Image (cartoon, grey):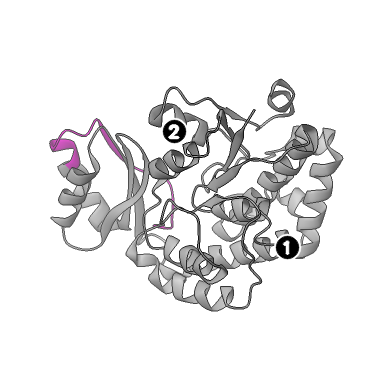
Amino acid sequence: MTRAFVFPGQGSQSVAMGREYFEASAVFKDTLTEASDALGYDLWDLIVNNPDDKLNQTEFTQPALLAVSIGMYRTAVSKFDSSPVAVAGHSLGEYSALVAAEALSFSDALRTVQARGQFMQQAVPAGEGAMAAVLGLEQAKIEEICASVEGVVEAANINAPGQIVIAGAKTSVQAVLPLLKESGAKRALELPVSVPSHCSLMKPAAEKLKELLADVDLKMPVIPVIHNVSAETAQSEENIRELLVSQLYRSVRWVECVEALKGYSIDGLVECGAGNVLTGLTKRIDKTLPCVTLNSMSALEEL
């Protein structure tokens, strides 16, 4: 089979995610040990025991999800003895895709996303930002309504036809929700997150990330990586940096990313990481495109 791999982002985390892999795969276990050494704390203990609810704190969530995704990816590749023809990741998952494509080292990626999480949390004080899911309304209509209210509220994730996430200042997001429902949205529901990702409120975080990435070693990928902001591959190492920085405050164009992956004549997608969010989105984007998730060892064996 000709496969593309996709990697999920924040929101997919759960306590003890990857336990089956940890108990059955030496490759996965070694990956988590490597992650702990890079970060300076026991990441697997954090994932399993979740002290002080750290797994849901952005600066810990991001490296935890990345480590689990890469542990599953390495296990899968060792089983298949073959690599995907292309990769992509949703938001944070783009870093997992870059690691899988050997454009970014695992240790650098871990430290970068931990700092990225800190920058994001610092950019907007707790309680002042919000995100909301909007179902059953076209993107153009959502953007028109968002532009009609005061303050920042923008389309953040173009996840699937009729499934878009908006982000911005909490008061602005809350003001736009009833307007979206009046305009025909089937649902317009605020999400339980503290950081309004992929909107212009993240520009201060992006500036800090730009400084950090200037000192991070990046290489051109050995397999194509489809980026969130452009829905295309990068043209240079510097272009990768630019795309990662702008990703913080621009929309995730996930529908277009999946369409771009289809251009590699793939037989299907493999979701590699916790949960199955991207598998669900794929069914909404293209019902004819098979997508399986490797969130358990049994799923890996079936594949």
Q: Is residue 115 left or right of residue 300?
A: left
**Residues in magenta, as a range:** 180-196
Q: Is residue 62 left or right of residue 251?
A: right
Q: Is residue 255 magenta?
A: no
- In the rendering, which numbered label is found on residue 107? 1
The residue at 76%/49% (across/down) is: 45
The residue at 52%/72% (across/down) is: 209
Query: Where is residue 221 shown, x and y percent of the image?
Result: 62, 57
Q: Is residue 13 left or right of residue 51?
A: left
**Which residue is at the front of the view, 229 or 125?**
229
**Which residue is at the front of the view, 37 or 285?**
285
Query: Where is residue 49 shown, x and y percent of the image?
Result: 72, 45
The residue at 55%/29% (across/down) is: 268
Badge 1 local density, few (<14 within 10 Å), some, or many (20+)? some
Q: Secondary structure at mark 2?
A: helix
The residue at 25%/32% (across/down) is: 136
Q: Is residue 171 left or right of residue 261?
A: left
Query: Where is residue 300 shown, x and y percent of the image?
Result: 71, 28
Query: The disc labelled 2 sits on which kind of residue?
Result: Leu
